[in-house]
Image: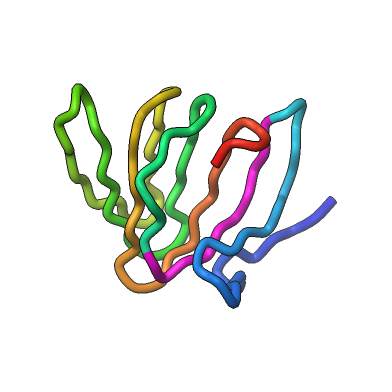
Amino acid sequence: MEIIRSKKFTSSLPWGAMKIANMNGITTKLHWTNEPYRWHENEGEEVFVVLDGMVEIQYKINSVVYTDLLNQGDIFYATEGTEHVASPIGEARILVIEKEGSI
């Protein structure tokens, strides 16, 4: 049993993470960041929930880049192989649910 106050979580490095759970190979992590990640594809599906702040998400479909702004409470679901990048606007806290070992 644990209660996590996500708004209080911070890290000394961008995309620093607190591991919350590993359920049968699916990890749940809380990330803090104030810098963009990098373009990448996950090994499996990914659920990306903005808990605090705003995040610009870019993703590619058939080599076309799309851009959306995610606000607090918004969810981005990436199917396996969806190339994407997340760029916070200021600080953001993000809950990420994905296959263990995925980038």
Is 30 on the left-hand or right-hand side of 36?
right
The residue located at (71%, 52%) in the rendering is 19
The residue located at (25%, 44%) in the rendering is 58
Is residue 22 on the magenta stretch? no
Q: Is residue 43 above or below residue 20?
A: above
The residue located at (74%, 43%) in the rendering is 21
Report the quarter where the C terminus lies: top right
The residue located at (27%, 54%) in the rendering is 56
Depth check, front residue: 40 or 75: 40
Q: Which residues are the magenta region?
A: 26-35
Q: Outermost residue toward the right?
A: 1
**Magenta residues, dominant SS class:** strand
List x then y, in percent, for residue 2.
80, 55
List x then y, in percent, for residue 37.
41, 56
Is 5 on the left-hand or right-hand side of 58?
right
Is 49 on the left-hand or right-hand side of 71?
right
Depth check, front residue: 95 or 83: 83
Q: How many numbered circles does the render carry?
A: 0
Is residue 28 on the magenta stretch? yes
Q: Quadrant of residue 52?
A: bottom left
